[in-house]
Amino acid sequence: MTTSGVVPQARFSAQARLRALQSDIMELILERELEAGDPLPTENELSVALGVGRNTLRESLKVLQALGVIEIRHGFGMFVAPSNFEALADGLTFRGRLSLRHQGFEALQLVDVRQALESGLIGSSMDVMTSEQLASIEETVKQMEELAGAGENFVAADAEFHRRLFEPLNNELLINLMGVFWKVYRKIHVEIGSANEDLVATAAMHRNIYSAVATGDKSAAAELLNRHFDGIRRRISEAVAA
């Protein structure tokens, strides 16, 4: 970057070329119908197929590895990476925590997305939920109530409650995304502290959500989930304003 704060055109062009190369590598994976765990062509083969030098290729491969697209196993080669949301979780965690130093906008936006997912999908999950799955949800509620009564935090039980709420949908992407949101929220939870959190009231809120689900009241379940996330949003806002 120059003293005027402007990125030189040559550098910008180089970054654009690298992004284009990364897209070309992903297109090659798709065109060859490679799946998770399948080996990629060697660096030499990729260099020839894509018409680029090995140093430039390696830069793009490192980025794709960081993004979780490919997996580089030293001594074995390169492979299409299995589903891995760690990079997404790490990036969102950093952005969420960083935003707490300012107005907390990104942390609040993460809550908005999760709220929309859960309140929007709870009815569909209730449609296919079995009695056994319902019983497993109540187990997590009891754990939260016991921990709250002892004055102990129950973030892990809380996360499991929400996971079990949507397990009936058998949607691996949704469960992975919820896992990402929980990883982010746990970090944010540590940042904002729990001094202002009423554990007993929070456990009671989860009991009410469970009761609405158990009685088949979809609108009440969605509304209670919305209120729950409103509480999380409020705690973040209070922490940022403090």
Image (cartoon, helix red, strand yellow):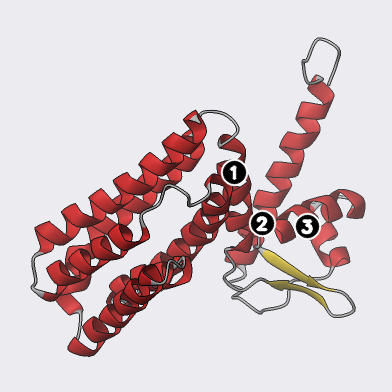
- Residue that appears at 85% across and 65% down: 43
Q: Residue at x 43, y 35 (%)?
A: 237
Element class at badge 1: helix
Residue name at image x 36 percent, y 40 percent: 234
In 3D space, how far apart are the residues under numbered discs 1 and 3 (Cα atoms)?
28 Å
**Mark 2 and mark 3 in contact (Cβ < 8 Å)?**
no
Above/below status of 132 relative to 50? below
| Residue 61, label in figure | 3
Query: In this figure, which residue is indicated by the disc labeled 2?
Result: 67
Tell me the residue that label 1 is attached to.
97
Q: What is the C-alpha distance between the residues marked 2 and 1?
A: 20 Å
Task: Identify the amino acid type marked 1.
Answer: Arg
Quadrant containing the N terminus is top right
Q: Position of residue 200 (x, y in %)?
A: 31, 62
- Looking at the image, residue 5 sits to the left or right of residue 139; the answer is right
Q: Are marks 1 and 3 in contact (CB under 8 Å)?
A: no
Tell me if mark 3 has few (under 14), some (14-19) or many (20+) residues whose alpha carbon lies within 10 angstroms of its own. Answer: many
